[in-house]
Image (cartoon, rainbow, N blue to C red):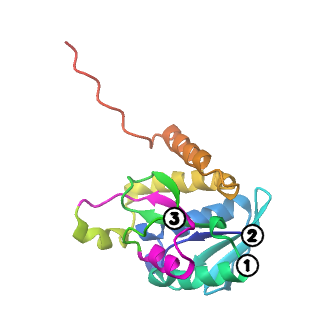
Amino acid sequence: MRLLVGLGNPGTRYAANRHNIGFMTIDAIAKRHGIGPWRRRFQAMTAEGLLGGDRVMLLKPETFMNDSGLAVGEAANFYKVPLVDVIVFHDEVDLPPGKVRVKTGGGDAGHNGLRSITAYLGPDYRRVRVGVGHPGVKDIVHHHVLGDFAKSDREWVEALCTAIADNAELLARGEDASFQNKIHLAMDAKGFGEPKPPKPAAD
């Protein structure tokens, strides 16, 4: 059993927040791979199914972000899931919008959801860091992540969630580098890659 966790806050009030990109990616994975139905367990919404032949549980905590570890810890302990098979999708302000990086272990970088999970499981789970961009001023980061994505963001958010869902089997197999690369290529193909450097001025 692999446990794929999306972080966010429950309820329609928060549904379009940058902080809820984890929920959005998990929903996309469920839809793309026919995983379901959803039901309430472990203080969360959960769905079970297969991802590339591997049994997985998708989990969206209903405890609110600051207490995400309650739900994640309960599910991981019930199924005795090794930390390497706990994969947490979360918003990352230190990555540009649409960029994805996968890492195992490390600190929480001020992310309350990660802090809570680490308190229950320790730090050595896998994290899929989904870039939502930094507002440029530290004091307004909280307002930024609890704000909705702008209308102009919707196209890349949808493209990113689709790319993550299309390649989620690589994560289940532990092929994190290949997963990152596939996301990069998919986003680049849709025109959401790195901006092209300016051409040198003609002599």
**Residue on which the image places disc 1:** 79
Query: Residue 104 lies in what quarter of the image?
Result: bottom right
Around disc 1, counting alpha carbons within 10 Å, would you say few (fewer than 14), some (14 to 19), or many (20 or more)?
Answer: few
Q: Amino acid at mark 3?
A: Gly
Is the C-beta separation of discs 1 and 2 under 8 Å? yes
Q: Quadrant of the C terminus?
A: top left
Residue 180: x and y, percent? 55, 48
Q: Closer to the observer: label 3 or label 2? A: 3
Determine whether, in the image, residue 59 is placed left or right of residue 146. Answer: right
- Magenta part of the chain: 112-136
Indicate the secondary structure of the residue bearing disc 2: loop
Distance, label 1 to label 3, CA atoms, is 20 Å
Q: Which numbered mark, 1 or 3, is in the foreground of this view?
A: 3
Q: Is residue 132 magenta?
A: yes
The part of the image, by quadrant, that contains residue 2 is bottom right
Residue at horizontal 76%, vertical 68%? 49
Viewer-nearest residue: 196 or 55: 55
Residue 82: image location, x then y, percent: 67, 70
Q: Secondary structure at mark 3?
A: loop
- Secondary structure beneath dot 1 equals helix
Q: Is residue 10 visible?
A: no
Q: Is residue 55 above or below residue 46?
A: above
Label 3 sits on residue: 105
Residue at (54, 70) in percent of width and height: 23
Which residue bears the numbered disc 2? 1
Lower position in the chain sequence, tag 3 or tag 2: 2
